[in-house]
């Protein structure tokens, strides 16, 4: 069974204080690892897809990286508007094509 | 246009009511999904439609009845719900059912069952 563990559960940063969120996973054949951002009471917003170890993707202040066991979401010089819950999800080859296994998320708070 | 829309935004219903949630996407996606999300929990898959046919039912109780009238629309019919069914209901779509593709989520419907 695919498993995803995100750490920390919550992270509080000062504006401009760079940090990283971790997503550790176990999966039988990784088909894709997905990062989402979710604001309170809203649907998850797609950020990145990573397919293979060594791959990196960037968008504004966010950079996602992937190894064979984990993914990191690096946040450079965050702003208060980056405050949200960040969800990591994996899709493995062992199950259905459609099935995403989500982590519990990291709640990021960026103080001005 | 990478938008999935859902109506209504909020719904309050009694346990004897019948109501429907609606979802629409105009991205030409051929796979559509219903997820349920409780507070401070990740989304849980309920149903998957691929090319307008039901592909997956994650052992969801029959009081939830999905419908896919066409490739752009997805409905979730609700009947005789329980208070524990109160949650954020999310619709999502992806280009095809082939996997390895990101899901695009709608804003959700906040459902409260009294």
Image (spheres, coloured by chain):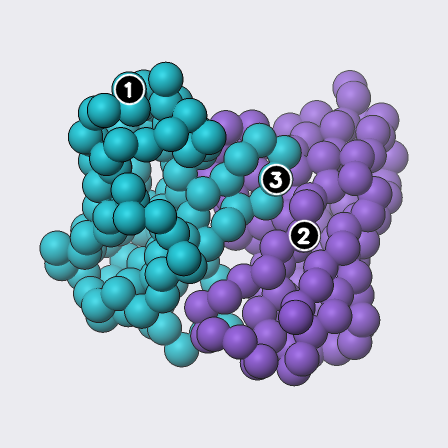
Chain colours: A purple, B cyan
- The chain ID associated with circle 3 is B
Residue underneath mark 2: A103
Callouts 2 and 1 on one subunit: no
Number of residues whose C-alpha sits closer than 10 Å to that of mark 3, classed few (under 14), some (14–19) or many (20 or more): few
Q: Are marks 1 and 3 on the same chain?
A: yes
Q: Residue at the spot x=19%, y=53% of the render?
A: B67
Comes first in the chain, label 1 or label 3: 1
Q: Which residue is mark 3?
A: B41
Q: Determine whether B11 is above or below B52 in the image.
A: above
User: How much space separates mark 2 and mark 1, taking CA atoms?
Assistant: 32 Å
Disc 2 element: loop
Q: Residue B84: x and y, percent? A: 46, 30
Q: Are marks 3 and 2 in contact (CB under 8 Å)?
A: no
- Whole-angstrom CA distance, mark 3 to mark 2, is 9 Å
Name which residue lies at 12% across and 55% down: B69
Residue B8 occupies quadrant: top left
What residue is drawn where x is 75% and y is 65%?
Answer: A25
- Are the residues flagged by discs 1 and 3 in contact, CB closer than 8 Å? no
Q: Which residue is mark 1?
A: B14
Q: Read off the chain for label 2.
A: A
- The local secondary structure at tag 1 comes to loop
Residue A79 x/y as whole percent: 72, 30
Q: Position of residue A51 (x, y in %)?
A: 63, 75
Residue A110 shows up from this direction: yes
**Marks 1 and 3, how far apart at CA:** 24 Å
Q: Is residue A112 above or below residue A86?
A: above
């Amino acid at each position: 069974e695919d498993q995803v563990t995100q750490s920390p559960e919550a992270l509080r940063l000062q504006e401009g204080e760079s940090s990283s969120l971790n997503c550790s996973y176990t999966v039988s054949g990784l088909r894709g690892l997905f990062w989402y951002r979710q604001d309170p009471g809203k649907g998850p917003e797609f950020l990145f897809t990573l397919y293979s170890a060594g791959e990196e993707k960037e968008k504004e202040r966010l950079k996602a990286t992937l190894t064979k066991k984990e993914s990191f979401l690096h946040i450079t010089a965050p702003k208060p508007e980056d405050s949200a819950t960040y969800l990591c999800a994996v899709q493995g080859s062992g199950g259905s094509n459609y099935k995403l296994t989500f982590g519990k998320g990291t709640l990021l708070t960026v103080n001005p | 246009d990478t938008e999935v829309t859902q109506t209504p935004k909020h719904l309050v219903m009694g346990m004897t009511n019948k109501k429907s949630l609606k979802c629409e996407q105009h991205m030409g996606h051929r796979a559509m999904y219903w997820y349920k999300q409780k507070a401070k929990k990740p989304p849980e898959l309920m149903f998957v439609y691929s090319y307008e046919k039901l592909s997956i039912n994650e052992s969801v109780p029959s009081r939830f009845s999905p419908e896919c009238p066409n490739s752009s629309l997805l409905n979730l019919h609700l009947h005789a719900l329980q208070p524990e069914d109160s949650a954020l209901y999310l619709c999502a779509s992806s280009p095809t059912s082939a996997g390895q593709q990101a899901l695009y989520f709608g804003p959700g419907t906040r459902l409260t069952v009294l």
